[in-house]
Image: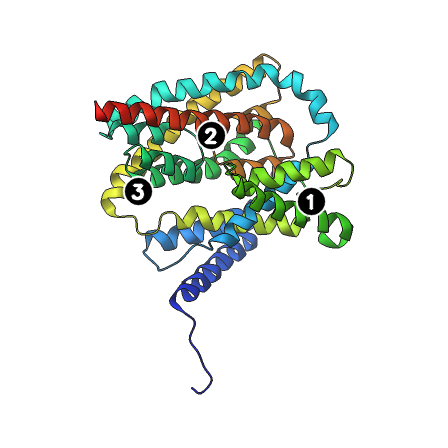
Amino acid sequence: MPGFYPLPPLLRRRALTLALAGLGTALFWGLSLPLPFLFGPMAACLIAALAHVPIKGFGQISVAARTILGVAVGASITPDLFHALPQMAMSVALVPVFIALIGLIGVPFFRRFWGFDLPTAYYAAMPGGLQDMVIFGTEAGADPRALSLIHATRVLFIVTLAPVFLTFAYGAELTNPIGAPVLELPLGEMALMVLAALIGWKGGERIGLFGASILGPMIVTAALSLSGLIHSRPPAEAILAAQFFIGCGIGVHFLGVTWRELTRVVLAGIAYVLVLAILAAGFTVFIMSAGLSDPVEAFLAFAPGGQAEMTVLAIVTGADLGFVITHHLTRIVLVIVGAPLVAGVMARRRKG
């Protein structure tokens, strides 16, 4: 047909992914299932990936979507949060203990039960960011494909099971307003949010900040919030868009998985989620018993899911976002700071 130019293969794959994710969202919405903008695209992309449909992630668009959550967290950092920090000190002090127990249990779990080598077992066990653990693990001689699948499985199952547990165990509702509609927010504040997202993201990348897409915007927005220039979260439509692309990203991670990987690597990840769930439940009960927090916030603070995904759950449950994110930031910082140190020890052992 004259004047008709087919889309390049990459754009065709992304258009297919967008269409499938949209159908998943519409199906979840039509069935009144919880979090349709997160679980709908996640389920659709996961099924497509396991069926070897040629889907493709959205690259920098997905990364940009995470900046929205960084801005949402930053907007919740107010003087009241700093006044509450001393009250969090005892529960935050438990995070290093939590990580140590994960290492002591997780590394032998992956080595003895699933036969992974030491670098792969260590970086698979550590509850850090997916990209960070794959990068550090690869440098230490671990299997990057196994790490990617295990961490993707961890995030997938925790994000899927956490809302069920919160609903049935603690009676939490996932209907908290996620933000005001875009038409109700001042244009000046929204412009500042966009600038905070871009400056924080790209500035964070420039200085080598880990998790720059979330932490950079969070830091810049927190400064604007504390100075009284921002008083609200990003609009609801923006947070729904962030959920959509995060859901797509989780599902797309399983593209190309083989039967051998499914029965060994992914199954190992599923089994490990049960181990992590038991540990997290134990810490949640302890924190509740000590009167350090209410059950929903304690659970979300120690649920070892992805930072972005836990931010979404904290928003929709109405949990104290500052409390939850403070604990997750502590966990991520400790894991990432320790990762290169452990990599150096493993490298010296290999040379020896």
Residue positioned 48% across, 55% down in the render: 24
**How far apart are the alpha carbons under marks 3 and 2?**
20 Å
Q: CA distance from mark 2 to mark 1?
A: 25 Å
Number of other residues with Cα within 10 Å of mark 1, as a class: few under 14, some 14 to 19, many 20 or more: many
The amino acid type of the residue labelled 3 equals Arg
Label 3: state its secondary structure. helix
Q: Amino acid at mark 1?
A: Gly
Q: Which is nearer the N-term, disc 1 or disc 3?
A: 3
Q: Is residue 5 above or below residue 294?
A: below
Amino acid beneath label 2: Pro
Element type at mark 2:
loop
Q: Are circles 1 and 3 on residues that touch, CB within 8 Å?
A: no
Left or right for 273, reference 22: left
Coloring applied to the structure? rainbow
Q: Residue at x 28, y 27 (%)?
A: 347
Q: Which residue is mark 3?
A: 145
